[in-house]
Image (cartoon, helix red, strand yellow):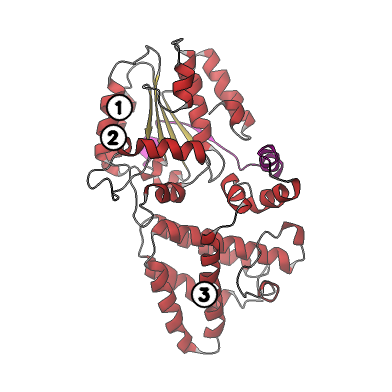
C-alpha cells in the first residue's frame, strides 16, 4: 500500500510525510479511523515510508508490498477456529491476514472474522499476543532500520495486554514505531491513549468514493449511487456494488421486527413475538448483531429521506415484500433522532459484551413507541 493508493485524508498524509522528512516520528501513534475511512491502509502506507526511508536493502519495497517484510509486524483480534484450537495469536493467521488486506483493505472487523471463520465469537488482543510482540520488537532490526508494529482494532486489547504493552511503549527500543488503529477510543485504556500521538481520519467525501470506484471500472451512475449509499464509508460503498446475501436476510429480520412493533400497540400479546425475535437475534454472533444494527440505521435513514421526497439520496431498495413507501411515512423529524439514539445505544451495549437478548428486547419495546410517534 502506497500513500497515493490511500483514498482521501490528504491533510493527514501531508502531515505524516512532513514529520517523516524532518525526522520527527512519535514512537506511539494512534489513528482514530471511522469504519471505511482507511485507517489500516494509511497505517500500512506510513509504515512502508518509515521502513523504506531508513534502509536501502534490495527487495525492501517488494517485501513491504507483499506484507512480508521482517521489520513490519501486525497485531489484530483473533479467536480459536477449526485450525487454531488454543492460545490464538496473530502470527498463526498471518497468511489469511495478508490475503484479507490485499483483497479488502477497507474491510472491518466483521469482514475479518468471516475471513478466519470466527464470526460467532468475540476476537481479542490478549496477553499472549503482546508477549509475542514484546519479543519481536526487542530484537535487532533485520535490515538495520526502523521496526514497525501496526495494532489494528486496538480497542480489542484487553486490560492485561494493555498493561504489558505500556511497559514497552513507555521505554521503546530505538527506531521502533507503534501504530494503533481504532474506531472507538472510548473502549481503550486512558493510560494507553495518553501515551499516543492521535490523528483523526475524516469520513470520505462522496466525490472521493465516486472517483475511486470509477477508477476501478465501475460505471459512473452505479459509482454515484454506491458513493451516496456509503455515507462516507468506502467499505459500504464497495459492498453495495455487488449483491449482499446478508442484506437480504437482514431485511427479512428488519421486516419482522417493525411489523411486530406496529402490532404491539393494538395487541399487547404481540410482545411475545418481539421476545422471540430478540431471542433469535441474540443467538447470532455479536459482529452479525452489530452489522444488523448498522443495516437498520441505514433503512431508517433512507425512509426519512423517502418521506421528505429527497429521493436522490435514498440508497435502500427492498428485496422482500416490504412496502417501503408506506413504511417511510412513519419515519419523520419527530422520531428519527430518538430511533438513531436508541440504535446507537444498542450498538454500544453489544460492543461492550452486554446481554444481547436484553439489549434487543429493550430496543424493540422502545421502537413500538417511537415508530408511531408523529
Magenta segment: does it hold 194?
yes
Q: In which quarter of the image is residue 282?
A: bottom left
Q: Distance of mark 1 from mark 3, alpha carbons? A: 48 Å
Residue wearing tag 3: 257
- Mark 1 or 2, nearer chain start: 2
In terms of secondary structure, where does tag 3 sit? helix
Note whether 355 is above or below 18 in the view shown.
below
Say whether marks 1 and 3 touch (CB < 8 Å).
Answer: no
The magenta stretch is 189-217
The answer to whether mark 1 and mark 2 are in CB contact below 8 A is yes
Name the quadrant containing residue 167.
Answer: top left
- The numbered dot on residue 177 is none
Q: Residue 190's spot in the image, x, y percent?
A: 38, 40
Q: Does the stretch in magenta take in 144?
A: no
**Label 1: element kind:** helix
Vertical placement of 38 versus 281: above or below? Answer: above
- Identify the element where label 2 is drawn: helix
**Label 1: which residue?**
168
Relative image position of residue 88 (x, y in whole percent): 27, 43
Amino acid at each position: 500500500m502506497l500513500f497515493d493508493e490511500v483514498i482521501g485524508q490528504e491533510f493527514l498524509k501531508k502531515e505524516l510525510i512532513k514529520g517523516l522528512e524532518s525526522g520527527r516520528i512519535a514512537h506511539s501513534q494512534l489513528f482514530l479511523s471511522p469504519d471505511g475511512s482507511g485507517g489500516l491502509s494509511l497505517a500500512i502506507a506510513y509504515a512502508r515510508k518509515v521502513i523504506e526511508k531508513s534502509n536501502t536493502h534490495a527487495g525492501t519495497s517488494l517485501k513491504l508490498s507483499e506484507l512480508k517484510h521482517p521489520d513490519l509486524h501486525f497485531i489484530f483480534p483473533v479467536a480459536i477456529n477449526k485450525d487454531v484450537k488454543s492460545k490464538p495469536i496473530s502470527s498463526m493467521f498471518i497468511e489469511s491476514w495478508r490475503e484479507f488486506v490485499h483483497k479488502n483493505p477497507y474491510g472491518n472487523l466483521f469482514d475479518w472474522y468471516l475471513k478466519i471463520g470466527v464470526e460467532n465469537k468475540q476476537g481479542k488482543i490478549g496477553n499472549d499476543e503482546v508477549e509475542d510482540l514484546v519479543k519481536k520488537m526487542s530484537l535487532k532490526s533485520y535490515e538495520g532500520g526502523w521496526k514497525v508494529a501496526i495494532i489494528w482494532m486496538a480497542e480489542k486489547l484487553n486490560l492485561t495486554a494493555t498493561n504489558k504493552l505500556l511497559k514497552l511503549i513507555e521505554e521503546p527500543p530505538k527506531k521502533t514505531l507503534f501504530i494503533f488503529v481504532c474506531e472507538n477510543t472510548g473502549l481503550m485504556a486512558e493510560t494507553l491513549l495518553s501515551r499516543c500521538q492521535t490523528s483523526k481520519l475524516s469520513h470520505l467525501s462522496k466525490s472521493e468514493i465516486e472517483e475511486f470506484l470509477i477508477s476501478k471500472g465501475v460505471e459512473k451512475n452505479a459509482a454515484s449511487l454506491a458513493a451516496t449509499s456509503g455515507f462516507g464509508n468506502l467499505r459500504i460503498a464497495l459492498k453495495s456494488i455487488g449483491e449482499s446475501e446478508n442484506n437480504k436476510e437482514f431485511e427479512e429480520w428488519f421486516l419482522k421486527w417493525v411489523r411486530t412493533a406496529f402490532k404491539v400497540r393494538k395487541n399487547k400479546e404481540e410482545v411475545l413475538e418481539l421476545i422471540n425475535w430478540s431471542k433469535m437475534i441474540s443467538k447470532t454472533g455479536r459482529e452479525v448483531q452489530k452489522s444488523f444494527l448498522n443495516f437498520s440505521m441505514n433503512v431508517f435513514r433512507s425512509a426519512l429521506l423517502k418521506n421528505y421526497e429527497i429521493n436522490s439520496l435514498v440508497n435502500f431498495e427492498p428485496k422482500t415484500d416490504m412496502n417501503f413507501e408506506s413504511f417511510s411515512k412513519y419515519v419523520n423529524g419527530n422520531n428519527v433522532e430518538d430511533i438513531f439514539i436508541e440504535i446507537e445505544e444498542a450498538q454500544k451495549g453489544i460492543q461492550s459484551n452486554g446481554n444481547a437478548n436484553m439489549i434487543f428486547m429493550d430496543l424493540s419495546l422502545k421502537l413500538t413507541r417511537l415508530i408511531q410517534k408523529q
